[in-house]
Image (cartoon, grey):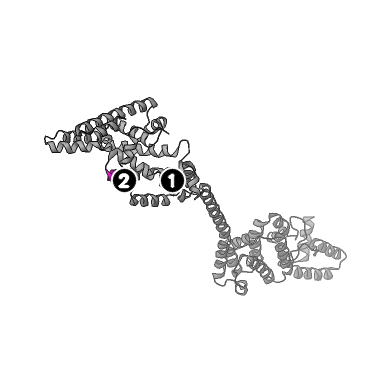
Amino acid sequence: MSKPSEFSDKLNAEGAPTSPASLDKKILAYAREQVPDKNPWQSVQWMTALAACSVAVVSIMLVMRTPLVDHGADTEIQSRPAGFATEESRPPMASKQHAPEPVKELRKTNAGSIPGNENRADLAEKIEGKSAFRPGSTARLMSRRLEPVSEKLQISSDESALLEYTDTNVMEERPEIAAKGFELLRSPIEPKSSGQTESGSTLKIKGETLAHEPGVDVDSKLRELKLLVAENRNEEAEKDYRTLVEKCQCQLPETLAQALTDLAERE
Amino acid sequence: MLNRLKGDESLMLAYQQGDSSAFESLYKRHKDGLFAFLYRSCRQEAVVEELAQDAWMSVINKAGTYQPTAKFKTYLYQIAHNKLVDHWRRSKNFSRVALEEADLASNDTSVEDQRIAEQRLQSLGQAIHKLPGEQRDVFLLREEGFSQEQIAQIVGVGKETVKSRLRYASNHLRTMLEESIQGMGDPASAKGAEQ
């Protein structure tokens, strides 16, 4: 502090002007308006929290987006004109949990629709159980693959339709199951004339059982007939051969003699 | 209540943390002193109000970045002085114009007018107003209780410059007051001024 000068008394005697009340009000109001943030960190934290919430909401929306797509696919399937019987009997699918059911039903129905295909139905069930499809992916596959399948199944309930259907769906999901389970399913498409498949498995009757079970060995049966012929039991041999032809329905020669000739050639 | 006991710097820091009542206390402490300083510098009430408002608003706006490196009063008057300098620059050397006006008044041929002008000079305030701006600021800051170091800090010049400006200001004022008192023929007043 400085010492009072020789003019201080005189200056004070003149009276010091004071700040007017209007100015005071104005300045104090401005000060209240412009109060600095109590804690600048708080606002920063608020911003961070807001950003985190936004990210969380966006991620949830992205996660929720998948079922929406699936639901769209399901709707597409439902809205399709009744192509085959399973669609009409199928309950409406509201959520992705219902997505696998039509696949299962479709397989069962398809397998069941072919006469004598109980084993195929079993196989389809096994595959269904083993593959354990993810619901979302199944629904997506359904949306992509069902159209051609339904059309083909409408035209014919041939096994090739089932093969194609199963091929396109299961092989994409589980190649190892497809390789293992459908090796046999593929074999009737190009059977050898002798009834043996490339893999050496015994071919059974066309359009019937394709499972890996013991069947009639055509060659051994022909060998038996050959023995009968050798024993001059021709009538008995012819009769057995006709029975074999009827039962087998495969492309066997019309006559036993021709069949035996073919057998001899093969051997 | 507690704000009364706090120092200016503490109050400013409290305001920085969002306590508006701290600023009110601070304002009440310094509003009249600052207003008087500005008024004695330019003597135009409207201008003084404007300058005071600008100075306080600057304090408010800079509150967020305020750091108590110096006394708050020094900080406040430094801002006010800068506003004053800006005002002088805008009004093209206001003190010189005022001085010329005063000279014109003193050169009036009418004896009566001359007497009135001399009477005006009896007022110390008017004598101060006739000082050159730099000397007047330093003088008024000294009257506000600032030390030479603080004045140097506020005005932005060296301590020696402050000393010389103070000396010149005092001499000028003394001379002006003596002349005016001698002209009015009042020895008692002249004696008081000499002291």
Label 1: element kind: helix
Q: Is any part of residue B14 visible from this angle?
A: no
Which region shows up in magenta? B43-48
Q: Give the residue drawn at x 88%, y 65%.
A: A231
Q: Give the residue drawn at x 73%, y 56%.
A: A180
Image quarter of the N terminus of chain A: top left
Answer with left or right where residue B71 lies relative to residue A187.
left
Toward the front, the furthest residue is B188
**Neighbour class for label 2 at 10 Å: few (<14), some, many (≥20)?**
some
Does the magenta portion include B47?
yes
Q: Give the residue drawn at x 60%, y 67%.
A: A95
- Residue that label 2 marks: B49
Residue A238: quarter of image: bottom right
Foreground residue, B186 or A246? B186
Say how many tags the image has: 2
- Host chain of mark 2: B
Query: Could you say where residue A151 lies in the image, as x and y percent from the top left?
Result: 58, 67
Query: Could you say where residue A166 lies in the image, as x and y percent from the top left?
Result: 66, 62
Query: Could you say where residue A32 lies in the image, as x and y percent from the top left?
Result: 42, 52
Residue A171: quarter of image: bottom right
- Residue that label 1 marks: B26
Toward the left, the furthest residue is B109
Residue A251: quarter of image: bottom right
Q: Earlier in the sequence, mark 1 or mark 2?
A: 1
Q: Compared to B73, does B21 lie above or below?
A: below
